[in-house]
Amino acid sequence: MSTYTQLIYHIVFSTKNRQNTLNYERHEEFFKYVWGILKNKGCHLYRINGHTDHIHILTSLHASIAIADLMKDIKMATSKWIKTKAVFKDFDSWQKGYAAFTHATNDKNALIDYIRNQKEHHRQTSFKEELVDLLRRANIEFDMKYLE
């Protein structure tokens, strides 16, 4: 018997101190790089997008990959790549931690639309407001001091 899983993760993480360093002009190139990391790990990317201070990824994980290991690999590889290629000139680093939410397969299309519309979404809502809302809807206890 093989291992079969259907785990869809909505992952969110931000730049250090939520600095607006991820300019839109280089998003596509950056997203392709992240997609390559996921693909090499046997993950399936459904959607990636973000704003100038954070990223959203909707992906399934390969059964052998732990979310913490994947996030460590993504953050380390992208930090090095961003700095080596000077993709985002003012980028310093990623903020510690991340948020990851599991979802049912039936939620996938709505999540893809939500992630696709990040630019419009953030005309009205800050990343902090968005993250608090995501955490509350997932019934995750959190301390506001870690969201500052």
Image (cartoon, helix red, strand yellow):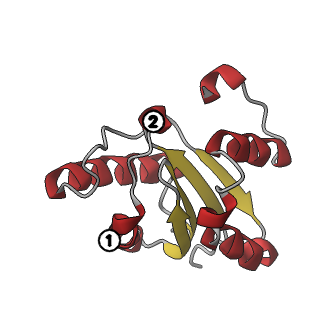
Amino acid at circle 2: Gln
Task: For the C terminus, give its image quadrant.
Answer: top right
Which numbered mark, 1 or 2, is in the foreground of this view?
1
Residue 46's spot in the image, x, y percent? 57, 77
Q: Do residues under tags 1 and 2 come within 8 Å of each other at their CB atoms?
A: no
- Indicate the secondary structure of the residue bearing disc 2: loop
Left-right relation of 107 to 22: right
1 or 2: tag closer to the N-terminus: 1
Measured in 3D between alpha carbons, the distance from the residue under mark 1 to the one under mark 2, in whole angstroms, is 21 Å
Q: Which residue sits at x=38%, y=73%?
A: 28
Quadrant of image for the N terminus: bottom right
| Residue nearer the viewer, 102 or 66 | 102
Q: Is residue 45 left or right of residue 83?
A: right
In what element is the residue under mark 1?
helix
Q: Which residue has dot 2 on it?
A: 95
Q: Please state if 140 lies on the left or on the right of 116 as rendered.
A: right
Q: Which residue is mark 1?
A: 29
Where does the image place residue 90, in percent across and percent down from the top left? 28, 43
> Does residue 63 appear anywhere in the picture?
no
- Foreground pick, 47 / 60: 47
Residue at figure coordinates x 52%, y 69% from the top left = 48
What amino acid is found at the position of numbered circle 1 in the picture?
Glu
Q: Residue at x 84, y 48 (%)?
A: 137
How many residues crowd around disc 1 within 10 Å: few (fewer than 14), some, or many (20 or more)? few
Q: Quadrant of residue 30?
A: bottom left
Number of the label disc, if any, that sits on residue 83 = none
Q: Please provide percent x and percent y for residue 73.
A: 36, 51
Q: How many marks?
A: 2
Front in this rendered view, residue 143 or 123: 123
